[in-house]
Amino acid sequence: MTASLSHHRPGQQTANLTSMVRTRLQRPPVLLPRADSALLKAALLIMLAGAMATGLGLYLTHRRPEEPAALQPARVGNVALLIPKDLTGLDEDDDTSRLVGMVRLRLDWPNLGPAQPQNRRRLLVTLSPPDKVNEPARQLATYARFLTPTVWSNPGGLVVRSFRKGSPYEGDEFYVSVPDGKGFAARCPIETAAHLDEPCRITFQHRGMDVNIRFPRSIIADWAVMLGGVRRTLDGLIR
């Protein structure tokens, strides 16, 4: 009898061990205490913040600085100029950006920077070699032959006169500064439905160049500010 019990005891132990292993495998995993879970989350957040800070630092230190506007040399008569490309309002592949002996600028109003496409109140400036026809006294003498005697005032300290019918300037009005028009003399189309977008025109001489400006009639009362700003802009381009 004793021998029989001894013979079956190892088999029984093996069965008990197998049962115990199966029981342990079926137990759910031990959950971390709340404090340990919060600590793990905090560590992950700190690592993520560090990675983001490192990436931002690399971007700020390695990003390219904004390139200044490309400068384009030009010559008008005897005057040498260095003009920012964005003031011409022309593409690099546009041949008209390299006019021989002339320069065209497009200036935004009122800041006189590069013209913005959405802003229709801009100045179109053409620089050309000096011509005696554009001397102030000669211009005034030419226009005076075709003016009517009627004179009326305009905001900005200007007076306005009309041109006679049948004259070369019929359909325009003449805006001049008092007392003699030497400070400002511009032609503007008479406001009609057909001429709402027609710009005013003035030509004057500045530092060895003829300066022609086409500008919206709506800013004519600010003529002194406009002329002063354009003159200062040109002074900054001359080399």
Image (cartoon, rainbow, N blue to C red):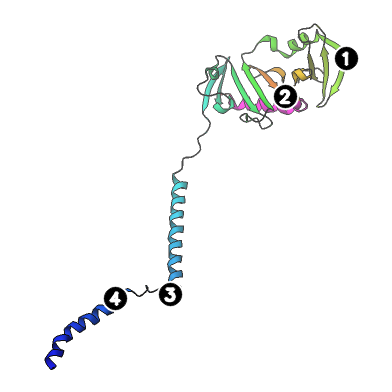
Query: Looking at the image, can residue 207 be seen?
Result: no
What residue span does the magenta drawing correspond to? 218-237
- Sequence order check, earlier mark of 2 and 4: 4
Residue projecting furthest to the bottom: 1
- Other residues around mark 1 within 10 Å, as few (<14) / some (14–19) / many (≥20): few
Which dot marks residue 22?
A: 4
Q: Are marks 4 and 3 in contact (CB under 8 Å)?
A: no
Of badges 2 and 4, the one in the foreground is: 4
Three-letter amino acid code at the position of disc 3: Pro
Which x, y percent locates residue 20? Answer: 28, 79
Residue 140 is drawn in which quadrant? top right
Q: Nearer the viewer, residue 105 or 4?
A: 4
Residue 7 is drawn in which quadrant? bottom left
Task: Please tell me whether residue 222 belongs to the stretch shown in magenta.
Answer: yes
Which dot marks residue 150?
A: 1
Q: CA distance from mark 4 to mark 3?
A: 26 Å
Three-letter amino acid code at the position of disc 2: Pro
Three-letter amino acid code at the position of disc 1: Thr
Q: CA distance from mark 2 to mark 3?
A: 76 Å
Q: Secondary structure beneath disc 2?
A: loop
Of badges 1 and 2, the one in the foreground is: 2
Determine the residue positioned at 46% across, 54% down. 52
Of badges 1 and 4, the one in the foreground is: 4
**Which residue corresponds to mark 2?**
216
Of badges 4 and 3, the one in the foreground is: 4
- Other residues around mark 2 within 10 Å, as few (<14) / some (14–19) / many (≥20): many
Residue 148 is drawn in which quadrant? top right
| Quadrant of the rendering where the C terminus is positioned | top right
Q: Are marks 2 and 4 in contact (CB under 8 Å)?
A: no
